[in-house]
Image: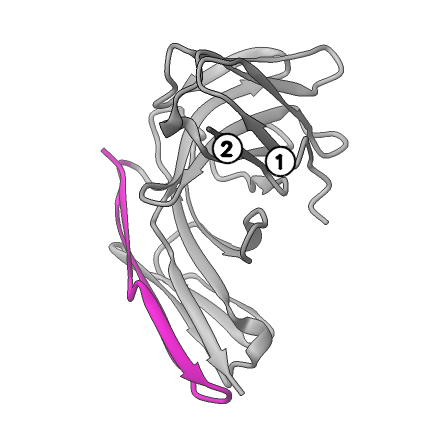
Amino acid sequence: EDQVTQSPEALRLQEGESSSLNCSYTVSGLRGLFWYRQDPGKGPEFLFTLYSAGEEKEKERLKATLTKKESFLHITAPKPEDSATYLCAVQGGAGFQKLVFGTGTRLLVSP
Amino acid sequence: DSGVTQTPKHLITATGQRVTLRCSPRSGDLSVYWYQQSLDQGLQFLIQYYNGEERAKGNILERFSAQQFPDLHSELNLSSLELGDSALYFCASSVDGTGGVIQYFGAGTRLSVL
């Protein structure tokens, strides 16, 4: 069964203090690993898709990387507006398109 | 704005009742997915429809059912509601039902069963 574990559960940073969020996964035939951002009371907002080990993608202060067992979301010089819950999800093979989500990392960036 | 529209935003009802949640996918998207998000379990996949036909099922209770109509909007029906059904229900859509395709999420319907 596909599984996703995210760590830490919560992370508090000062503005400008860079850090990384971890997403460990087990999946049968990875078809995609997805990062979403979720603000309280809102739906997940798509950030990145990674398809194969070694792939990297960047968007503003965020950079996502992928290995065969885990993905990292690096946050460089974060701002208070980066505060949110970051969700990692995998989509496996076997012909299914469902996303299997981790429980997320709650990030709080203080000014 | 993801382009996925869900109504209503909030629903408050009593145990034993039945409710219907509605989802309009992004323009051009053929596939619709339903997810449930509760405090203790995170986002859980319920069911997927592609162009009007059921494509995949997750941990969806027998009291729950869904359908996708010819205009591609979808409805999730929840019946014999229990306190434990209180959660956020999200709809997502994608251009097709193939692997690796991005799913875009709506703002959700918050269901409170009292």
Colour mode?
A: one colour
Q: Is residue B109 left or right of residue A1?
A: right
In space, the residues marked 1 and 2 are separated at their CA atoms by: 8 Å
Q: Secondary structure at mark 2?
A: strand
Q: Kindly check if marks 1 and 2 are in contact, taking CB atoms under 8 A apart as contact.
A: yes
Q: Is residue B3 magenta?
A: no
> Do callouts 1 and 2 point to residues on the same chain?
yes
Q: Residue at x 47, y 32 (%)?
A: B35
Is residue B100 positioned above or below A88 on the image?
above
Quarter of image, res A6: bottom left
Q: Main secondary structure of the magenta part?
A: strand
Q: What's the amino acid at mark 2?
A: Ser
Residue matched to label 1? B10
> Is residue A108 something one can see in this rendering?
yes
Q: Position of residue A22 (x, y in %)?
A: 31, 64
Q: Position of residue B50 (x, y in %)?
A: 58, 18
Residue to which mark 2 is pinned:
B112
Q: Which of the two discs, 1 and 2, labels the residue nearer the N terminus?
A: 1
Highlighted range, magenta: A1-28
Residue B98 in sight from this viewpoint? no
Between A48 and B77, the one lying in front of the other is: B77
Q: Dot 2 falls on which chain? A: B
Dot 1 crowding, Cα within 10 Å, few <14, some 14–19, many 20+: few
Instruction: Establish if A89 lies above or below B57.
Output: below
Residue A5 image point, x, y percent: 26, 53
Q: Is residue A27 above or below residue A109?
A: above
The residue sitting at 50% across, 33% down in the picture is: B112
